[in-house]
Amino acid sequence: MIARALTRKGSALVKMAKCSKDFEPAIETFQKALTEHRNPDTLKKLNDAEKAKKDLEQQEYFDPKIADEEREKGNEYFKQQKYPEAIRHYTEALRRNPKDPKAYSNRAACYTKLGAMPEGLKDAEKCIELDPTFAKGYTRKGAIQFFMKEYDKALETYQEGLKHDPNNPELLDGVRRCVEQINKANRGDLTPEELKERQAKAMQDPEIQNILTDPVMRQVLIDFQENPKAAQDHTKNPMVMNKIQKLVSAGIVQIK
């Protein structure tokens, strides 16, 4: 009975809420109700109230003008190579305006400088999601993938960026560097250490794992070793050759 009464009170408080702080007593009431009796309906009401509070907080904090100011402060710290400080200001800029692709791009650059590649990649991808025409998102993402020696993925990223900005010098240079590395693998010019490192990294790539465990591709690889006529037929299949190229670039397969 107490739990039910508290749940009703919490629901009434939610209906009266006009700002994020107004949700606090409702959330507290739902929490008390759950200590009396853990009811799924009450738990859902609590989760909904917490989400509504968070959404309102973001709306109340939203301020593009302050976001631009914070981004500029971040830019100044970036120029001074003070990357943690720059990240702090870019993060504040994104709290003020979560839809700013430039802040994501700039923070991705900071993460890259600090060697935090997963965080940088996530920001670069968010930048592209927010503005697919913004070339910097692709140069940031491609640079991270290149640094991680994922040359095929980096090449795809740079090429995607060139669809939106065909003459961008950073994207064109990225393509050139990726092709250079891929050709190096194709020619078998990798040192034993480079080959071993590239193979180890490739084996952690889900895409490479899927290719190697695909029964059709396993037969294709066998044909390339044992059945020249079948192998020749495979070369006419663009999808198969694309997968073979990925394995070659990864150092898994060498074509003599």
Image (cartoon, rainbow, N blue to C red):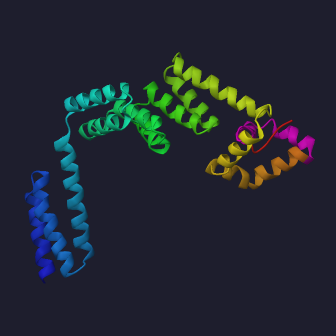
Residue 89 magenta: no
Q: Nearer the viewer, residue 142 or 5?
A: 142
Q: Residue 201: x percent and y percent? A: 65, 47
The residue drawn where x is 37% and y is 24% is: 79
- Residue 228 on the magenta span: yes
The one nearer the camera, 132 or 97, is 97
Residue, x 44% and y 43% (percent of image)? Answer: 119
Q: Residue furthest left?
A: 16
Position of 206 with respect to 70 (left or right) is right
Q: Residue at x 25, y 28 (%)?
A: 68
x, y (%) of residue 204?
63, 51
Quadrant of the drawing holding the N terminus: bottom left
Q: Quadrant of the C terminus?
A: top right
Q: Is residue 181 left or right of residue 236?
A: left
**Residue 202 vertical position relative to residue 184 in the rendered view, above or below:** below
**Quadrant of the rendered image containing residue 230:** top right
Q: Which residues are magenta?
A: 226-250
Image quadrant in which you'd find residue 28: bottom left
The quadrant holding residue 232 is top right
x%, y% of residue 239? 71, 40
- Please tell me how many numbered marks the rendered image carries: 0
Q: Residue furthest bottom?
A: 1
Apparent side of residue 102 relative to residue 199 in the rendered image (left or right): left
Residue 138 pos. (x, y %): 49, 30
Residue 161, relative to residue 210: is it above or below?
A: above
